[in-house]
Amino acid sequence: PSGADRDDDGVLRVGGIPATVLRERFGTPLYVVDEEDVRAHARRALDSFRGAAALHGVQARVYYAGKAFLSTEVVRWVTEEGLAVDVCSGGELAVALAAGADPSRIGFHGSNKSTVELERAVEVGVGSIVIDSLIELERLAAIVQRRDAVQNVLLRVNSGVHAETHEFLATAHEDQKFGFTLEDAPAAVARIREIAGLSFVGLHCHIGSQIFGTAGFKESAARLVELHAALLEGGAIPVLNLGGGFGIAYTAADDPTPIEELAAGIADAVGRECAVRGIPMPNLAFEPGRAIVGQAGVTLYEVGTTKSVALGDGASRLYVSVDGGMSDNARPALYGAQYSARIASRVSDAPSVLARVVGKHCESGDIVVDAEYLPADIAPGDLLAVPATGAYCFSLSSNYNYVPRPPVVAVHGGEARVIVRGETIEDLLSRDAGLQLTEIEGI
Ligand code: LLP
């Protein structure tokens, strides 16, 4: 996070606090999130998208995509900075509401939303629900009719643009589960418009995640505008929601487009396409997740063992095992995601060697950092800091091997506080129906 520098004794400061102090107070592994960094990225995203939209005389709403990392504190930070919140399950909705988010500034997403989830969303009055399928449309129609409610809805459209990112992160090419094709969308919109309790407010598209360039966003936006224009015959459409997906740098090799440039490029693409079609430009909406929280997070681990493994030809690789792994960061195992690491508890004059930071789980794919040069004298007890773990690490965490999830600590103004407490083994055993609660005590 911002403000990561070293003390005179070589200890890395995270958000102004020595990593060794964080270890003493909270233990390891530890997710550390820099509140000011989250707020700064929220402001930057809002300014970028609003500024870009204003140049075309329209407004932009920016939703924070909670799936990247959600807790009530994070909801408070981003909403205080002026962002709306995008949730994609009943659980995420509950967190946003518990944090006091204004329901009218919550967007509800998700493929295969249940009747219970939709009912709750309508009941609390979420600002919009993004419809993902015809079955969901009818499910929601039944709910609004029964409740005599009126609900704003968008239609999720698959623009067919293949974003250049990991296969599992690309969501808008043809063979995938999300949304309606460009061909099927008009019939779905017509159906929405038949239902008195549903107010069609716009189209939605999200082409994938961790995208570096602007081309895919622009192409997708242009296709959406074409569809939007065709649908105007049936009535005005106030919004066009172009989703999230804006990439961040995980390692020095990553070179994402700055969000200001992305925002300007996308707004220009929409503006140009609207001009060509002679239609008024709709207000815009965006849903960044990773770009808000990704770089605000750092994970601290303690080294437990090291092992040099011969690779043949005299080469070797140093395996550095830490006290967490794929249960707190599944991204390397899931997507081959790359991270960096450095010793946080001291500086070393030892020569650097090629190392692989691995976790404590029973899988050879349990990798934290695939390839990193670390000092050859790295040893048990050293603290390792892995930056850029703010997005999709806590939210994708698991209890694999019955490893409790680490706490999340927020740093701000030189102070640290727990915002999500760590799990205990008792927490995990408390769900085991084969045990009486009294038997769990003392484990
Ligand atoms: N809007 C929708 C409809 C989405 O599905 C997503 C992410 C976002 C917004 C936010 O995307 P972002 O700005 O964070 O890229 N677990 C994967 C990422 C999955 C993204 C899922 N949808 C990862 O760790 O890379």
Image (cartoon, helix red, strand yellow):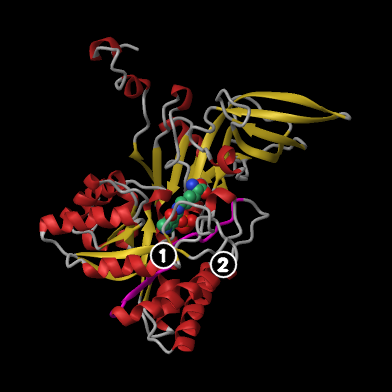
Does the image show residue 40? no
Q: CA distance from mark 2 to mark 1?
A: 21 Å
In this figure, which residue is indicated by the disc labeled 1?
184
Quick check: 416 above or below 196? above
Spot occupied by residue 97 in the image (x, y as percentages of width and height): 23, 51
In this figure, which residue is indicated by the disc labeled 2?
216
Q: Nearer the viewer, residue 138 or 62?
A: 138
Dominant secondary structure of the residues highlighted in magenta in the image: loop
Q: Nearer the viewer, residue 317 or 330?
A: 330
Quick check: 364 above or below 420? above
Local packing at callout 2 (Cα closer than 10 Å; few below 14, some 14-19, many 20+) is some
Q: Which residues are magenta?
A: 235-250
Left or right: residue 306 versus residue 207 is right
Q: Residue at x 36, y 47 (%)?
A: 70
Q: Residue at x 34, y 39 (%)?
A: 420
Q: Residue at x 55, y 56 (%)?
A: 210
Q: Amino acid at mark 1?
A: Asp
Spot occupied by residue 174 in the image (x, y as percentages of width and height): 53, 58
Spot occupied by residue 102 in the image (x, y as percentages of width and height): 22, 60
